[in-house]
Amino acid sequence: MMKILVILTIFCHYLAKMFCQKVIAVPPTPLPILYSFRRCPYAMRARFALYTAQVSHEHREIKLKDKPQAMLSVSPKGTVPVLLLSDGRVLEQSLDIMRWALNLKGLHSEFELLIQENDTTFKRSLDRYKYPGRYDEEGSINYRKECENFLLKVESYLQLREDDDALTFLDMALFPFIRQFSMVEPEWFDGQPYPHLKLWLQRISSSPLFERIMQKYGVWEALNPPIIIKP
Ligand SMILES: N[C@@H](CCC(=O)N[C@@H](CS)C(=O)NCC(=O)O)C(=O)O
């Protein structure tokens, strides 16, 4: 069994090299390992995908201010989420983890654009809106307005979409960030006219899936028994 795993690891190493993916020389792990931080929106979208695709994995909760060496040695850039696959491949971007878990080959270009905008201009303005003291730039109301340009696009998309319960790749990718926006000034947000967006937020926030991905875990310690997630 061990021999087969070693041969498999070497083969995957070779394949990943061919396709320029990062691979590290670690002993094969029985299950993929997810380094995660509960409130991180990138980690949330990765967990959404892993749970939806029913990928069993080990969950390692980290502190952003005290990242474990085990994580930094597989991914020195030091952001979460990081997924270490059983064959030694390392996925260091939330969208890569989602694509891998959901076995996604391609996405409609309109959705790609929305996700790209979310991860760049919207995220930038959201951070400045959320932490007005941290950035010595324009006032937070201007950043809120910038965020709203994006919200309007999502609202129009949701308005056209058929109502169904299944969470899509786009939902998982955007929801954690838009939820953050809605929580900066909840009373102000309640008074705004985004009927489809509000329903969408409400539907996902109250879903059992969301409750599961937001389960609280203690910070990972190598000596403690592993937290195994079997979605
Ligand atoms: N492009 C990355 C971004 C991940 C990211 O920035 N995560 C934040 C937490 S939400 C992080 O780990 N920051 C490092 C730090 O705060 O030290 C992804 O999509 O996974």
Image (cartoon, rainbow, N blue to C red):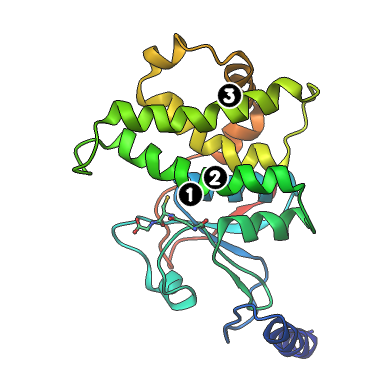
Residue tagged 2: 117
Dot 1 falls on a residue whose secondary structure is helix
Up-down: is 200 above or below 51? Answer: above
Amino acid type at image mark 3: Leu
In terms of sequence position, does the residue under pointer 3 or pointer 1 come before the other? 1
Neighbours of disc 3 within 10 Å: few (<14), some (14-19), many (20+): some
Quadrant for the N terminus, please. bottom right
- The location of residue 199, given as percent across then percent down, is 62, 17
Tags 2 and 1 touching, CB below 8 Å: yes
Q: Alpha-carbon distance for marks 2 and 1?
A: 5 Å
Residue at 44% of width from left, 50% of height from top?
Answer: 37
Up-down: is 168 above or below 70? Answer: above
Residue tagged 3: 201
Residue at 45% of width from left, 70% of height from top?
Answer: 71
Dot 3 falls on a residue whose secondary structure is helix
Residue at 44% of width from left, 73% of height from top?
Answer: 70
Q: Nearer the viewer, mark 3 or mark 2?
A: 2
In terms of sequence position, does the residue under pointer 3 or pointer 2 come before the other? 2
Q: Is residue 163 left or right of residue 48?
A: right
Asked if residue 51 shows in the view, the reply is no
Amino acid type at image mark 1: Thr
Dot 2 falls on a residue whose secondary structure is helix
Neighbours of disc 1 within 10 Å: few (<14), some (14-19), many (20+): few
- The location of residue 231, given as percent across then percent down, is 70, 46
The circle drawn on residue 120 is 1
Neighbours of disc 2 within 10 Å: few (<14), some (14-19), many (20+): some
